[in-house]
Amino acid sequence: MKMVILPKESLPEFIGHLCPFGELHVPVKVSEKSYAFGRVNDLSDIELNYTRTILPLKKYVFKPVDVMFNFCAATGYETTVEETDAKRVIFGVHPCDIHGLKILDLVFGGKYVDGYYSARRNKAAIVGMDCIPDEFCFCRSTGTDFVDTGFDLFLSDIGASYLVRVGTSLGDDMIRAADSLLREVQEQDRQAYKRRSTQRRESFQTEVQLQELPEIMDLEYDSEVWRRVGDKCLSCGTCSMVCPTCYCYAVFDELDLAGGSGRRQRRWDSCLFKDYALVAGGHNFRPDRDSRIKNRYFHKQRGFVSQHGRPSCVGCGRCKVYCLVGIDIVEVIKELRSEIRV
Amino acid sequence: MAKPKVGTYGLTGCAGDQLVIINCEDELLEIAGALDIKSFSMAASGGDEDCPLDIVFVEGTVVQPEDERVLRWLRERAELLVAIGTCAVWGGLPAMKNEMRPEELRMSVYGPEGNTFQCVSPRPLSSFVKVDLAIPGCPVEKEQLLQGVASLLHGDLPQLPTYAVCTDCKMAEYPCLLVEQGWLCLGPITEAGCKARCPGYGRPCIGCRGPVQDANIASEVQVLQEKGFTWLDIQNRLWTFAAPAESLKIDFLKEGANA
């Protein structure tokens, strides 16, 4: 893999060189404790010292609410994939969120390609950046604390500089555009990168064993844990909205008053909503909160493993940070494994 | 197809929901073109108060015996009855003191002079008559109202949100005011549809759209108590807009609070 060194003082200028490759989106501070990816007028508003944004990158490629097509009784329908959607460069993306996108790629870009997703995905350039975990991060346990693919460029903080890995030909074009700011990797950089790697590994405060978890979940299908968690759960949908890999959506029509025309839309859905598994005739497969939150865990940690060979959780910690009643995925898994009792 | 005959009426309330219809300025001509408006006293006097109606929109709460009489009369006149606004759907602000006897409450507000009118414990329209469609909100959201009308014109009922304000709040990527600020926010138990307007302005949800289906009130109460709110703070907030709601009944709440 091609690697180069970018001195930290050249970062603003380097970001300037990325702008011709698309609309720049960067992490910004939106409140005392929260961050979000967005546009900035001033490069000094970029907040690289963030751990996680409220929403992951899915908001760019799988919009919270999206028009799928317009319909009209007289003229038929026309799809509305935004061909004109701007190219984007999303800068400062952490490894867990890159893995989140890779998991969405499996779902939306697999056997049945989702055109709305892929149209935007193909126009998103990803410039990743490494990070130091906080107490909520458990991406080391999910194997998503580093990336080998899924980025155009990836910057690792090695002290006075960044080590820049080039992941794609587009990434190569980017560093060529910023050639004057970059230099070759030298001995001290190699040592610094290895020290950074150790430092990141040793910074993890949270660990959870995901090996054999699918079997343990099957064995603990009727566990008391689900009742306890179900009693607490507000079914508010927050965890699904902020999850990098929750991809369910509900489809609905918005009608025009004049009649005969409207828009078919889709909107993020959650398996925690009471009517998620409600079917025609009024039967609800998961009428209780216990069964709904169990379903969410089963899909992430068991069903997805059967289908794709890995859990769909990327260990970003968002569901724990933003859960209003403090439901902690790591604690739930440890309880299922009988490693702790609450 | 003949245009459906509609009427818009207000029981005891602030008329804010009817005002939302009038405020649909860009759509007013379309509305007038699609509906045969027989009576809408807030927009024009001289309506037809006798004809049968296809759809009647009713805002406000039953607070006096006269409200109940009007409501039953409207129900008999109309094929479909649409409750608009939180007062009509949940009882709204008039019902916030429903734990007091109506006479006692009247005395505390109007003194002995209040004796000139009768009052009952305010209750939502659905506790008196069949309601075909309930659109909550204080006031109703213009988009939901228009979608409601559009669906009815297509012979269907609209799909109103069945999820909580938190969902809209996170879709809009607003910082969580309960988690981050420790504020008394009712987002987790309140029906969405407002696009989390208040949290978007940095203010907590006060529950003006009433409880979402399957709201976990016990867990919400518990987390608010853990944040340091007193039983009275929580009760006052919960009962501001939807006190008659079954999920907010006091016994259940006390059970949750003691859990």
Image (spheres, coloured by chain):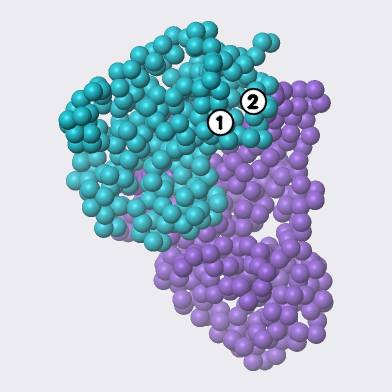
Chain colours: A purple, B cyan
Residue denoted by label 2? B31
- Residue B163 vertical position relative to residue A255 in the rendered view, above or below: below
Q: Residues within 10 Å of mark 2 (few under 14, many from 20)?
A: some
The reply to whether residue A290 is in sight is no
Dot 2 or dot 1, earlier in sequence: 1
In the rendered image, residue A233, in percent from the top left (x then y), is placed at 37, 46
Which one is nearer the viewer's eye here, A218 or A256? A256
- Residue A298 vertical position relative to residue B140 in the rendered view, above or below: below
Q: Residues within 10 Å of mark 1 (few under 14, many from 20)?
A: many
In the rendered image, residue A210, in percent from the top left (x then y), is placed at 46, 57
- Discs 2 and 1 share one subunit: yes
**Callout 2–callout 1 Cβ contact below 8 Å:** yes
Q: Quadrant of the N terminus of chain A?
A: bottom right
The CA distance from mark 2 to mark 1 is 9 Å
Q: Hey, what amino acid is under mark 2? A: Ile
The residue that appears at 30% across and 33% down in the rendered structure is B95
Q: Hey, what amino acid is under mark 1? A: Ile
Name the chain under label 1: B
Q: Provide the secondary structure element on which disc 1 rests.
A: helix
Residue denoted by label 1? B21
Q: Is residue B70 left or right of residue B121?
A: right
Q: Quadrant of the C terminus of chain A?
A: bottom left
The reply to whether residue B199 is in sight is yes
